Amino acid sequence: MKPAFRIYNVFRPIGWLYGLVTGLRNRMYDGGMLKSVSFPIPVICVGNITVGGTGKTPHTEYIAALLKDRMRIAILSRGYGRHTKGFILSDAQSDSNLIGDEPLQIKRRFPDVAVAVCEDRATGIKSLSELCSPQVIILDDAYQHRKINPSLNILLVNYNRNILQDAMLPAGRLRESAKCRRRAQMIVVTKCPKDLSPNEMDDLASRLAVSPGQKVYFTTLEYGSLYPLDGKSAVPSQDCPVLALTGIADPAPMEAQLRKSHKEVSMLSYPDHHDFSRNDISEMEHRLKSMPQESVIVTTAKDAARLSGMDLDDNLKSKIFILPVKPAFLRDAKGFDDTILNHIETFK
């Protein structure tokens, strides 16, 4: 887990000030000067202490898939990038402008699961409980939301950006000190290379775990088969040139995957949660026309959630395909599953 990323030392003084502020806030919550709310049902938080790129939504989906046939669950997100405010319970007509791209992605994968957004998680949990009576609530990205006290905190750490060697914003990407990992009962090191050795996993686990009983797991990315945005177009062959369209925090793994399966890959990358405009669509069409006629666009499920709400030309839509991704455990997947299930079964 080498620091193959950049830290901007010129911004370290600002980062120290930022760390002082976040540290004081955390101490006030830890000491009871600021109050956290607990709830009478299990509340599982999936989050991180860095800015983006750890795979929160795929891991949230993994937990949802584990639980949805066993009990009544609900998923709550802030709904980053939406054009609305307050509590909204999604339905079949919801789009990314209403609830955000990641909640829409989750709702489309689990149409029978209650998915809601609310910037105030305590309010969101109360509203979900009243409307849906869930037995478990999963929070997508709420590790810094100290107003609530989750019954189980799961912290995600990107293997390629070691939080133990990172720096506070804006010098690095930490939203709070790496010491705050002590709040998590479970730590998942994500985006690991598939050939990560057991010795390296053991070494990294020993350095990350700081609280009694804290468990550390390791996942890699597992990509599925392409499927069409329009639901009917034929899946292209592997020889087909690809324009990879991304608006995510870390497009490098997707690019690497596509280069394994396609001879020609061009990248068109935008910032995370990018709100696609008509100019962006024109740029996609222009780039696609400059490539061989059989070329297609491959994007992520999160980006597809935003694209699907736009008035795309049928011909362009027929050339857009989605590359699904999910986490795969390098070891002890059963231990991860059993820990969550046991937490719920023994919850009081």
Image (cartoon, grey):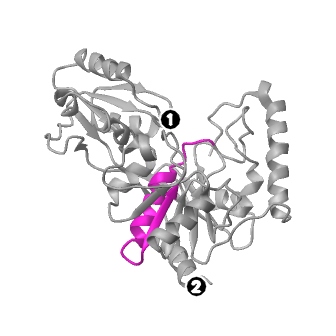
Whether residue 70 is situated above or below residue 206 in the rendered picture: below
- Image quarter for residue 234? top left
- Which is nearer the eye, 283 or 74? 74
Q: Residue at x 55, y 53 (%)?
A: 118
Residue 344 seen in the figure:
yes
Q: Which residue is mark 2?
A: 346
Q: Magenta includes 97?
A: no
- Which is nearer the eye, 271 or 295? 271
Q: Magenta includes 73?
A: yes
At which x and y percent is residue 30?
82, 63
Whether residue 298 is situated above or below residue 47 in the rendered picture: above
Instruction: Name the residue type under label 2.
Output: Thr
Give the magenta part as a residue range.
51-77
- Which is nearer the eye, 251 or 100? 100
Helix, strand or loop for disc 1: loop
At which x and y percent is residue 147?
70, 59
The CA span between labels 1 and 2 is 38 Å
